[in-house]
Amino acid sequence: MKVLVSACLMGENVRYDGQNNLVCHDRMKELDIVTCCPEVDGGLPVPRIPAEIYHDSVLNREGVEVTACFQKGARHALSLVQQHDIQVAILKANSPSCGNESIYDGSFSKTLVPGKGITVRLLEQYGVKVFNEHQLDAAFAYITTLS
């Protein structure tokens, strides 16, 4: 079974600051992984100005709206899901693209609020079950039920 995983969690330096969020978990080796970074796939550079969701728009710290790039990246992630018949994703927590439980509030004060990133919203509309890197045990338990 293929699983969509945020590229930063696999060690790719695609975060806004040019770094990664490598997850070292032995069970990750068991997965047939398809990686993506919706923000890069949507046309944003690495490094890039941090962005947060404010209401239904995505604004970078300089106040420039980048919603269209986030939506384009979400559509790319969905195309990968459809192409590879993916039912599960493990994405980066708190990201304006990939956050599945909480996101930053748009004030750039590091304040988290309940919410979902742009990519998660779209993938869930198409039935994809989304987990974050802090929910790996739950993700693997869920994947086991699908096998």
Image (tube, helix red, strand yellow):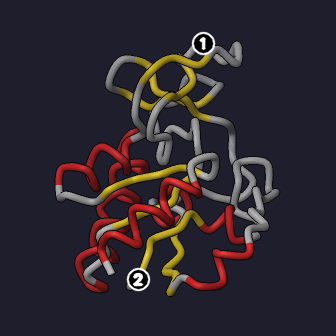
Question: Relative to the observer, which residue lies in front, 11 or 50?
Answer: 11
Residue at image mark 2: 2
Q: Is residue 111 above or below residue 87?
A: above
Q: Is residue 45 left or right of residue 89?
A: right
Question: Relative to the observer, which residue lies in front, 80 or 48?
Answer: 80
Q: What amino acid does circle 1 point to?
A: Ser
> What's the residue at 23%, 77% (across, down)?
82
* The quarter of the displayed image where residue 18 is located: bottom right
Question: Relative to the observer, which residue lies in front, 83 or 87?
Answer: 87
Image quarter where the N terminus lies is bottom left
Q: Is residue 28 left or right of residue 123?
A: right
Question: Residue lying farthest left?
Answer: 126
Separation of residues labelled 1 and 2 (CA atoms) = 36 Å
Q: What amino acid does circle 2 point to?
A: Lys
Q: Earlier in the sequence, mark 1 or mark 2?
A: 2
Residue at image mark 1: 107
Image quarter where the C terminus lies is bottom left
Q: Is residue 57 above or below residue 39?
A: above
* The quarter of the displayed image where residue 67 is located: top left
Question: Relative to the observer, which residue lies in front, 63 or 20?
Answer: 20
Residue 118 rendering spot, x and y as whole percentages? 37, 43
Mark 2: secondary structure: strand
Q: Residues within 10 Å of mark 2 (few under 14, many from 20)?
A: some
Q: Pointers 1 and 2 in contact (CB under 8 A)?
A: no
Q: Residues within 10 Å of mark 1 (few under 14, many from 20)?
A: some
Mark 1: secondary structure: loop
Which disc, if any, is residue 63? Answer: none
